[in-house]
């Protein structure tokens, strides 16, 4: 590992899935896992290519039930390129002797480099060097250059390059009882002597896929069509010490693309006019250089290297190309099939970073939610609620995609999945709408699509709240919090919990902020919105009341995770750690023992502490005060302590949230959790999950930790508000951001000083607010401010 490269040396079959995920290349439109081109999908390798927003729905028979699932589709594999000495066996690291092997990922330019030296059966060696890219300038292109050099060997090398339509979704072991065959009507053909094509469609969503491949080499190319594959065959003459090269240029289109008539025609035409590999590489590097300038982050040491890798994967999943697509934030990126490519609440951790660098991408991701507002309103009506009830898991059309059953791989049992009760996803969407509009000053979006979403989400919360005369409070019952371990009360026959603190407090915030937005809308727009939605002053009065009277439960002097949490049993944490070691997935361990985590004060991720992640200390105190609760420092500290000792960190987001919260209060403890968040995927701390796809929310969250968490950065009333809390291990760093139309505003924290540079322009100055002082920074000016200890 260097500042700008990640290198994996040696061939380790047990590490292949992890390396393939972390070496995925993408451009926001599609991505391809870092599998070796000569290897097929098996228990070691899993080549996969995923197009953003390309889903298909299938029904499977599992545990005596028919269950329907929608998956992000593994589209035809463009990678295959295998080779062998004439008449010999195909060479792979699993079947031939390997002298050297290395994968080198170059995040600076989005290139995956591969070096392998095979021992040839008749003597001598074959050195293979490959460069791979998924083009960042033209999102429909990918390319693979392969260079062969013989050492101590003369003869012919047979090479086969293929497009393979015989793929399925089989990348997650616990899904393998489910039908994963999403492609049908696979056809192949030849366009020219050096170009072949493949077309197919998804089985139920009827998305047509067109793929074309051009092979550039000096030897004649023969073609063989063996559906579902098309194969181009070449024989290369090997002379010791003299490299020979084959370039594979591929184009990919689907029927979801804009400005095309047919995806196959578009793919063939694009690959035919594509330049050679060297020119593609040059324009690809330029596009990445432009992205890095906009996403500039300067953090020293190992933390900086990891953060750059995280940024690389965020930008591969959600690039400026995403602004033209109808897609959401896939929780596991475009890197694998875990969570079936679904969209959860992870945008809550992703969009705040994008808001300040790529606001056009953030806006597009919010428009994905707005297009599905009608479906969310339909779901609410089906549940006898008003407003919008957004699904916990979303895919193509906005209906609830949460699985009906999930497999506990420890016990082998299929269990009911109740996580669709996480209605707090609506609050996450509202949070992102408001944060985006504050950061971008996008009044047009706030007054139209943003206001519509806020209104319907607030309406849902107000309608979901019921009055409890005994408590003299409104309550929200039958939900599930972000913790996810608890989905029912012990021995209850009905699912759901009452008064989850995170859900209730964020619902109160949504109601209060939506009231503010509606009251500041231009009068014509407010009238239009009211006429379209049937909004009246009586309903607004109810919102006001509910926003001040939602119930916040307590036990033993701390905020309860939900009503009744204090009645649960304490878990023998030390005993379980002694027996199992890693207890991150405590829920699976207990279920396999015939027990349930619903009986215990145990959290996968402490959702009460999420409140400290979303809101600054002053904002959180004001929010609790609105609810009639005095939240002082001592109460918050006790609450943090309580959950700190009862959380298994079964989510990669847990360490991020704990690090963020503790950085403001107990810096010495914060770094341990920050490290956990940084290493979540590179060290696969969840035990095999990264091989199924990276954790996009955790990766983006670490970037936002540096950008907003440690700086206390907020945009309020057009001003840049800062309240830095540098950790000893992260006390010197810098980054650029885009605020109020100004590009390249730079902040640097170093040795107890904050430096702010505003690039020259004809824009207005930026107001910068720190605790107890305020400065105005003119375009072209640099200001340095001393920070308190």
Image: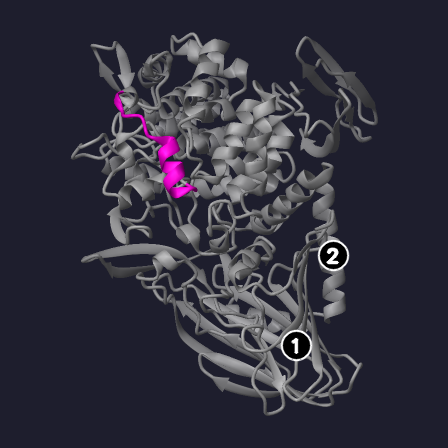
Q: Residue 24, located in which quarter of the rendered image?
A: bottom right
Query: On the rendered image, what quadrant is the C terminus found in?
Result: top right
Residue 126's disc number: none
Q: Which residue is mark 1?
A: 118
Q: Give the residues drawn in magenta, as a range.
A: 567-582
Establish if 691 lies above or below 39.
above
Between 539 and 167, the one lying in front of the other is 167
Q: Is residue 720 left or right of residue 504?
A: right
Tag in front: 1 or 2: 1
Q: Is residue 111 left or right of residue 652?
A: right
Residue 282 in sight from this viewpoint: yes
Q: Which residue is mark 2?
A: 285
Residue 16 placement (x, y as % from top left): 54, 61
Give the residue at x 31% y 61%.
178
Establish if 422 lies above or below 371.
above
Label 2 crowd bin: few (<14), some (14–19), many (20+), radius 10 Å: many
Q: Secondary structure at mark 1?
A: strand
Q: Secondary structure at mark 2?
A: helix
């Amino acid at each position: 590992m260097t500042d700008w490269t990640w290198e994996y040396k040696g061939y380790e079959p047990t590490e292949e899935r992890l390396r393939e995920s972390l070496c995925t290349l993408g451009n926001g439109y599609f991505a391809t896992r870092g599998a070796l081109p000569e290897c097929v999908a098996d228990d070691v390798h899993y080549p996969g290519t995923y197009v953003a927003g390309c889903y298909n729905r299938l029904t499977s028979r599992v545990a005596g039930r028919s269950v329907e699932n929608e998956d992000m589709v593994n589209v035809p594999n463009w990678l295959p390129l295998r080779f062998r000495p004439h008449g010999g066996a195909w060479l792979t690291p699993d079947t031939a002797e390997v002298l050297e092997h290395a994968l080198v990922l170059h995040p600076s330019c989005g290139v995956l480099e591969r070096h392998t030296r095979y021992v040839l059966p008749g003597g001598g060696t074959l050195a293979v060097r490959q460069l791979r890219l998924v083009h960042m300038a033209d999102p429909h292109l990918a390319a693979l250059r392969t260079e062969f050099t013989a050492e101590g060997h003369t003869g012919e090398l047979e090479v086969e390059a293929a497009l393979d339509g015989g793929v399925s979704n089989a990348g997650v072991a616990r899904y393998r009882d489910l039908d994963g065959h999403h492609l049908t009507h696979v056809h192949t053909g030849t366009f020219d002597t050096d170009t072949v094509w493949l077309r197919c469609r998804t089985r139920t969503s009827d998305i047509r896929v067109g793929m074309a491949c051009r092979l550039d080499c000096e030897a004649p190319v023969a073609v063989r069509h063996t559906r579902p594959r098309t194969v181009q065959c070449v024989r290369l003459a090997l002379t010791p010490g003299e490299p020979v090269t084959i370039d594979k240029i591929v184009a990919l289109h689907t029927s979801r693309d804009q400005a095309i008539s047919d995806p196959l025609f578009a793919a063939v035409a694009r690959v035919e006019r594509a330049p050679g590999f060297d020119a593609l590489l040059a324009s690809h590097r330029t596009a990445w250089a432009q992205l890095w300038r906009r996403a500039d982050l300067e953090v020293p040491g190992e933390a900086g290297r990891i953060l750059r890798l995280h940024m690389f994967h965020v930008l591969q999943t959600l690039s400026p190309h995403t602004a033209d697509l109808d897609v959401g934030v896939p929780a596991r990126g475009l890197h694998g099939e875990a969570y079936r490519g679904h969209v959860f609440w992870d945008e809550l951790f992703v969009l705040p970073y994008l808001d300040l660098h790529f606001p056009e991408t953030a806006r597009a991701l919010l428009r994905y939610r707005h297009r599905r507002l009608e479906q969310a309103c339909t779901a609410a009506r089906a549940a006898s609620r008003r407003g919008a009830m957004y699904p916990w898991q979303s895919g193509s059309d906005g209906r609830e995609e949460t699985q009906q059953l999930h497999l506990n791989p420890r016990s082998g049992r299929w269990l009911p999945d109740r996580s669709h009760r996480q209605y707090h996803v609506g609050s996450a969407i509202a949070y992102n709408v408001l944060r985006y509009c504050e950061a971008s000053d996008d009044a047009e979006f706030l007054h139209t699509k943003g206001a519509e979403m806020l209104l319907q989400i607030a309406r849902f919360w107000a309608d979901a709240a019921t009055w409890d005369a005994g408590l003299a409070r409104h309550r929200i019952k039958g939900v599930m919090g972000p913790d996810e371990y608890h989905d029912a009360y012990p021995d209850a026959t009905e699912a759901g919990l009452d008064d989850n603190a995170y859900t209730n407090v964020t619902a109160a915030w949504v109601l209060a902020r939506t009231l503010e937005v509606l009251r500041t809308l231009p009068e014509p727009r407010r009238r239009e919105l009211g006429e379209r939605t049937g909004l009246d002053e009586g309903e607004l009065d109810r919102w006001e009341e509910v926003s001040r009277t939602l119930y916040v439960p307590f036990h033993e002097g701390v905020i309860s995770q939900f009503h009744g949490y204090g009645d649960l049993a304490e878990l023998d944490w030390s005993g379980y750690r002694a027996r199992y070691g890693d207890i991150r997935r405590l829920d699976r361990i207990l279920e396999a023992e015939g027990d349930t985590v619903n009986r215990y004060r145990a959290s996968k991720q402490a959702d009460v502490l999420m409140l400290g992640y979303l809101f600054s200390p002053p904002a959180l105190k004001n929010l609790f005060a609105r609810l009639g609760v005095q939240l002082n420092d001592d109460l918050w500290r006790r609450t943090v302590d309580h959950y700190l000792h009862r959380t298994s960190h079964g989510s990669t987001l847990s360490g991020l949230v704990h690090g963020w919260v503790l950085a403001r209060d107990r810096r010495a403890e914060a770094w341990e959790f920050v490290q956990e968040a940084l290493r979540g995927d590179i060290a696969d701390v969840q035990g095999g999950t990264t091989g199924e796809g990276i954790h996009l929310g955790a990766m983006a969250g670490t970037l936002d930790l540096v950008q907003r968490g440690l700086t206390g950065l907020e945009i309020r009333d057009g001003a840049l508000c800062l309240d830095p809390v540098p950790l000893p291990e992260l006390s010197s760093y810098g980054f650029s951001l885009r605020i109020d139309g100004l590009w390249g505003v730079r902040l640097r924290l170093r040795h107890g000083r904050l430096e702010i540079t505003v690039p020259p322009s004809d824009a207005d100055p930026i107001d910068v607010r720190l605790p107890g002082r305020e400065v105005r920074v003119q375009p072209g000016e640099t200001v340095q401010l001393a920070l308190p200890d």
